[in-house]
Image (cartoon, grey):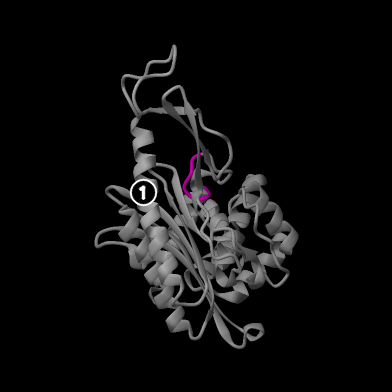
């Protein structure tokens, strides 16, 4: 595994006639228009008396905070089993990732992909979920029920069907396994999926997004660990967790958590993936610590 972090917002700096031109490229594709930060004087024929825009200042501030988080996570990573994480601030569209492109087995967080595929499939045929599908979906997300997941996985068309849905949702680094819990994904892809659950531009309709939100905000109280640990009093959260003891890793644990935190001035999605945890309890603690560190340093 690579130990270096990956920035989801990269900057190419070009010195132009006494000014500094910034070209930003975002993780979801496409180059933004070049923005010029003046260091004295102006470009010929292009005076910029107003200085940096509000968006440019926000990006610069985010990057400064991201550097402190990167340093903190690097230090923390040296003391715990391997993990990765990604964060999306919906208000600004800015993202951060630590080892965000490393692949991990999903365990039960794949159930969000199964749910999304179920909703897309129903939309495609212009129908509502059947009472049986509704019951399976609720049990799958709220109680992380495996039998319900297997029933939906088979009904939808197994791995090939889920993979096609993932492609529609923009997941480019996720490989669905015939044993659904062994699907491999990245923290970056999981944040993309979380974004599709709240974006007006998502292939998921408003009613489908609301359905997913309702289920993920009403999970079994015993399963509200992980991402919710970063929420403050009075804030709302959604969550889906995954935990799996792997015989192929000497009985060590996969512990994953994905979710969203919202409040008066907060709308952030977080994905934390990990493996090689000695116990499930120690894995829960590690994932929660990492999630809380994003809040401490990104100051959202």
Residue ID at (55%, 45%) = 27
Secondary structure at numbered mark 1: helix
Residue ID at (72%, 63%) = 159
Q: Is residue 73 above or below residue 11?
A: below
Label 1, on which residue?
Answer: 64
State left or right for residue 224 relative to residue 158. Answer: left
Q: Nearer the viewer, residue 159 or 89?
A: 89
- Asked if residue 218 shows in the view, the reply is no
In this rendering, the count of numbered labels is: 1
| Dot 1 alpha-carbon crowd within 10 angstroms: few under 14, some 14 to 19, many 20 or more | few
Q: Nearer the viewer, residue 294 or 246?
A: 294
Image location (x, y in percent) of residue 204: 56, 46
Which quarter of the rendered picture does the N terminus lie within?
Answer: bottom right
Asked whether residue 198 is drawn in magenta, I would say yes
Q: Is residue 239 above or below residue 90?
A: below
State left or right for residue 228 relative to residue 32. Answer: left
Q: Is residue 72 above or below residue 65?
A: below
Image location (x, y in percent) of residue 146: 59, 75
Image location (x, y in percent) of residue 223: 43, 74
Toward the left, the furthest residue is 233
- Asked if residue 291 shows in the view, the reply is yes
Image location (x, y in percent) of residue 205: 54, 44
State left or right for residue 167 relative to residue 75. Answer: right
Residue ID at (64%, 66%) = 184
Instruction: Give the residues drawn in magenta, as a range.
Output: 196-200
Asked whether residue 49 is drawn in magenta, I would say no
Q: Nearer the viewer, residue 200 or 277?
A: 277
Q: Quadrant of residue 254?
A: bottom right
Q: Please, what is the dominant secondary structure of the magenta stretch?
A: loop
């Amino acid at each position: 595994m690579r130990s270096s972090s990956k920035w989801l917002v990269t900057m190419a700096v070009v010195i132009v006639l006494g000014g500094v031109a910034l070209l930003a490229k975002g993780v979801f594709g496409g180059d933004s228009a070049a923005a010029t930060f003046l260091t004295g004087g102006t470009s010929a024929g292009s005076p910029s008396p107003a200085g940096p825009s509000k968006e440019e200042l926000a990006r610069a501030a985010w990057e400064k905070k991201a550097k402190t988080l990167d340093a903190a996570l690097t230090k923390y990573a040296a003391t715990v089993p391997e993990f990765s994480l990604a964060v999306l601030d919906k208000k600004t569209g800015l993202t951060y990732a630590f080892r965000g492109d490393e692949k991990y087995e999903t365990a039960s967080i794949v159930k969000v992909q199964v749910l999304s595929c179920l909703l897309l499939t129903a939309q495609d045929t212009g129908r509502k979920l059947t009472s049986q599908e509704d019951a399976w979906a609720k049990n799958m997300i709220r109680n992380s029920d495996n039998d319900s997941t297997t029933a939906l996985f088979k009904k939808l068309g197994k791995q090939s069907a889920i993979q096609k849905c993932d492609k529609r949702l923009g997941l480019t680094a996720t490989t669905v396994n015939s044993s659904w819990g062994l699907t491999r994904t990245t923290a970056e892809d999981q944040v993309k999926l979380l974004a599709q659950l709240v974006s007006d531009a998502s292939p998921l309709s408003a009613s489908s997004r609301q359905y997913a939100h309702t289920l993920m905000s009403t999970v079994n109280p015993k399963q509200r660990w992980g991402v919710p640990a970063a929420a403050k009093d009075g804030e709302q959260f959604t969550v889906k967790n995954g935990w799996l003891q792997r015989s192929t890793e000497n009985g060590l644990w996969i512990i994953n958590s994905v979710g969203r935190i919202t409040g008066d001035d907060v709308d952030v999605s977080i994905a934390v993936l990990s493996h090689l945890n000695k116990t499930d309890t120690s894995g829960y603690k590690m994932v929660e610590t990492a999630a809380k560190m994003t809040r401490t340093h990104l100051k959202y």
